[in-house]
Amino acid sequence: MDVTIKVNGRERTASVAAETTLLSLLRDSLDLPGAKLGCDVGDCGACTVLVDGMSVNACLMLAAQVQDRDVTTIEGLGDYDHLHPLQAVFEQESSFQCGFCAPGMIISAKALLDENPKPTEYEIREALSGNLCRCTGYTKIIEAIMDVSGQSASHADSKSA
Amino acid sequence: MAPKVDVKERTKPLESLKQADDGPVPAVLRDIGHGLLPLTPEVNKQTPAVGQRVTRPDSRPHVLGKTVYIDDMTFPDMLYTKILRSEYAHAKILSIDVSEAEKMPGVVATLTGKEIPVVTFGPSYQDQPLLADDKVRHMGDGVVAVAAETEQQAQDALAKIKVEYEPLETVLDPLEAMKDSAPKIHGDSNIYATKTIKKGDVDQALADADYVFEGQFKTQMVEHVPLEPHASIALWEPTGDLHVYSSLGRITLGRADIARTLDMPMNRIRVTATIVGGNFGGKNEITLEPILALLAKKTGRPVKGVFTREDEFISSTTRHPFVMDYTTGVTKDGIIVARKVRIVCDGGAYCSWSETTLGKGAILSVGPYNIDNIKVEASAVYTTKTTTGAMRGFGAPQVCFAYESHMDDIARELGIEPLEIRLKNAFHEGSDSPTGQVLESVVVKESLEIAAEKFGWQEGKGKTNSNKRRGQGIACMWYPIGFTVLANSSAAVVKVNEDGTATVLTGTVETGQGSLTVLGQIAAEELGIAADDIKVVSADTDTTPMDTGAIASRTTYVTGNAILLAAKKAKMILFDTAAPMLGVKPEQLEARDRKIQVKNFPQKALSIGDVALQAQFVNGQPALGSASFNPHTVAMDPETGQGKPFGTYVYATQIAEVDVDEETGEVEVLRIVAAHDCGTPINPALVEGQVEGGISMGVGLALYEEMLFDDNGKQINPNLTNYIMPTSLDMPEVEVHIVDSYDPTGPFGAKGVGEPTSVPTAACIMNAIYDAVGVRITSLPATAEKVLKAIQERDQAQPKQIAS
Amino acid sequence: MPRFGMFPAAFGLFDRGSTLKPFEYLAPDTVDEAVAILTDNAPDARLLAGGTDYLVELKHASEVPKVVVDVSGISEFKGIELTDKGLRFGSGVTHTEIMESDLVAEHALAMQEAALTIGAVQTRNLGTLGGNLVTCVPSVDSGPVLIALDAAVTITGSKGIRIMPLLDFFVGPRKTALEPDELLVDIVIPKEMLGRGCSFRKFGLRKGQALALVNTCASIDLDAGKLADVRIALGAVAPTVIRAVKAEKLLNGKAPSDDLFAEAGDMAATEAKPINDFRASAGYRLDLIRTGTKRVLAEALERAPR
């Protein structure tokens, strides 16, 4: 079947089997490998993208379900010379380590800030609870979101004691 | 000895990111077109490079979603591989029939163990088959590989493979496996490694001690859970060379394994690692690589294999469960005079890194304490469970949980405050380690004091809160850098370019920890240039020099030293070149602020670029250095374990504050204050990141994570739905303090920090639980159910006191 | 060869393949169309709503249905509204919509508490109330609050419309009263139940993305300071959501007290039949029922209009 979606502002069409997931559509047919396959069952959040501004696990949607809808992936947020504020702050604070969770994490953070520009630390934790990260303990990710939303993080950086 | 580096903290230029009116972040659906940051943050251009919170060169691709992991790579005509795994935890393979599978749509080739030239591999013993050919020893053993046009076709074909097994008796408990009556998994005995450490006269000292305490502690099997599953691609070049792209964390040894199993010369094999999506020790072994290579050879097409999340759980390595018995003799003043430790390490179906884990665990099991009389006996045993192997901490989180829980029990019985008893016994500069090594740059007391001060440690503060009770717990640890005795060298090449920038070649792999950033900073520091002036090229066996890889917390220390030495050599060439240009002797020169200058006469200087240009194009001697480094160790005596197994050690303390719900047993970790020694922090931001991440793994080990097996040896929870790792809601607030220390043998005084960060976490949480509700959890994880059961037993043992 | 061996996954050139087995996908716009598709294809058709459970199930299934019917586009299944019957939730309402609804906040706050415990944001954005109920796992998180608030469900099919209490809709683990050609249209919390004191608590193995070990919910009225029409619903402690009727009986007509609530918790535990599994023992689940029941009763009391 043909599926047409608006992805990162561009209309794209692909011919896929009915059972194709949105994640597979993005990664394998539309050349957008930013969203990652980490568990394939909606536990890890590495495949998080926005559909009509709403964060979803792309592994748990069929491509057919996004027909004519607006999809934003990590590739739509910024490019090398023009970083989205979230991308800039995550880079600046070395918030990510292996980076595999980063695309999903940034999209989840964006979905949060789009709705709630000044989230509390709890709201940030709640908003990221669908995005597993094994490297960072989430600490620098949460701090970066506090920072970019104009709030200072709840605890200071380390001191050389 | 290198001069001590003055570590400058940068101030975060985050203000630039914020809106002037402090208003909300603009709605940002597709607002490309506002570069908010200079392309290179100022800090990356500053000298000195060491000690700066330099941003990571891999951060930009990460945040853009442009990092290329294996699964993001495709080659024309590429095939997919899936592995059929064993139906039994222990069985003889009688026959394998792939004929029906080969007829399935899209299937191009199959592979069995018999077709692999050398089917077994392993770092200590070659006891693990790539694909089991005669016997399966746990349910994760692969039996047949299928290559097909699509992943689904390969998957579907697995169901058509017929394997006939003769089931054998399983043994899942390591203590059972040690018995003579237990079924034998390999050879004649299931005990496949033993380690002994002896010092003084432990029996006499125990007899003489004022008090003797005993305790048994157990830990569980846990998974690394890298977010990126194991993945690789194999293809054959037209030259007949094999090229493997792999998520391996150590390519040099990976290539050796691939060459061995394929019976091929190493120079015909190129292993390229990508940025690895998480390692934690779990990607230190080859998995699919030789299988894919053979399937690619059979089919003439590139072949990719990516583990499913279930593969990751059932067939990759895991953390060893330990059973630990402690007997400790103390004086009435709380001085430990003797310690006996017995460790049984559940080694799973294959040895993998068990021998090393056992050795490290045995040495560390005594704790960071001065004890004159010691006896440690440790054994690793085979069971028909998932293979255990290298995992962040190599046995240390297990033994730290035991010795620090034990320590609090001793302190309580003697009426000594937990911090005080640790300070009384802790190592000091020049302490004699359990293996007789004289310890240097020892800061365990400092870490205890800093953590206590920052936490606000005071005995018995604020304990109740409705049905929850609050507690605080402390744990300290020591941890070595590098392999136990064994050579674990690194080599490096540093090239100074004609414009004064430099390129570093290293065979280590970036597995997320930020090693390339740190290594670049070390090279930059030595050359007197900034982090941004360095490019680190890594992880390609054809182009980068050998390296033992991202393992054993060794990269900063060992690879860093190799890079430092290589940079020194390149710098010497620059000095030799600049000396006549400046009319001085080379030894009068120094490299700083991107200049070669005369010491104390900074006005007499040349830019490094000019000197490098001169060296290359006028003198014809390019500024190039290569070097290698291996930590200085002395072999351990096989009888007593005495020797110098490691180049250096780090020390740390963590303090946890928890709330325990007395009616449900639920434990909430509120905060953890960590004071870690890493020598000089080459990049404080990355040190913090390691500590924070290590603590999250520690929290998982303490409270949530456990790989569960049914009676047949089948994993019950091989997925992220039922394997409970911490989410953002489960992580406490973490406060990181870096303890000031300097190791003269490390690059600019640096040691390492990767693994130790998850070592004391479980221990301090268990001590905090005790402090809160007075129950000692002796086996991990401390699930709510386990804690509640202990609380109920406490109440039965002593009538409940009415809490105010 | 391009740098790093990277070839773009050019369209059509390379197909990695799906991790799902082939099926036919249909997306009706109306209930009538959906019923017609189900009637034509029963029993070889299955419904897809949010997909957060069903696609996972399909990925693990050895057999898939011929037709997957995506009902997420059906407008009759949308919306949360106050009608003369009560608070109506279309079956296609997502958990996020429940969390964001002012109507739900005002009339049935515990529904929001329950919604917040379901998966994570991504799951709640897609997952629907109807899907959660139809999946009908013993731990169904939306079930206890709706049962404590005496909700009824509307079912439509080729033979017409049926309305039944949600308690009867749950037949067994992963089994509801739906016939193969039927769909769940809406769920209504009756008017008289709105605004009463109600509290929900879930116990899981961690805070984020937790699956329920035990779900507890209580709703109460106060009649002259005495407890009235108490409803206690427990999830994950029996094949389907149950009401702890003996505990309810114990409470009705009595003045509330901590001791009474504790006694009710003990009584509720005698009514449940939790299982032993790898997540928790039956004994621990009974402990959670005792504690959870006591706590939701106390909180429901705090919330009850006086």
Image (tube, coloured by chain):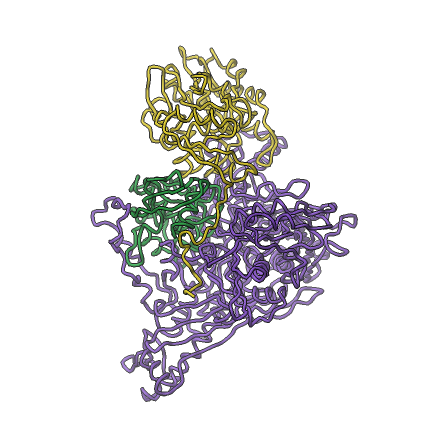
Chain colours: A green, B purple, C yellow
> Which residue is located at x 44 percent, y 33 percent?
C117
The answer to whether residue B417 is seen in the rendering is: no
Q: Position of residue B643 (x, y in %)?
A: 64, 68
Q: Image check: A146 left or right of B638?
A: left
Nearest to the observer: residue C124 or residue A14: A14
Is C70 left or right of B350, judged from the image as shown? left
In the rendered structure, the answer to whether residue B708 lies left or right of residue B239 reads right
Quadrant (top left, top right, bottom left, bottom right) of the C terminus of chain C = top left
Left or right relative to B94: residue A140: left
How far across and down, in percent of the image, does residue C205 sit?
A: 52, 37
Q: Can you say which quadrant of the picture contains the N terminus of chain C?
A: bottom left
Q: Is residue C191 above or below residue A135?
A: above
* Residue B412 visible from this viewpoint: yes
Quick one: which residue is furthest to the left in this view?
B21
Q: Residue furthest right?
A: B181
Q: At which x and y percent is residue B68?
A: 42, 57
Q: Nearer the viewer, residue C142 or B231?
A: B231
Residue at position x 52%, y 73% in the image: B629
**Residue at point 31%, 43% (across, down):** A113
| Location of residue B127 by image quarter | bottom right
x, y (%) of residue B474? 51, 49
Q: How many circles with numbers are drawn on the protein?
A: 0
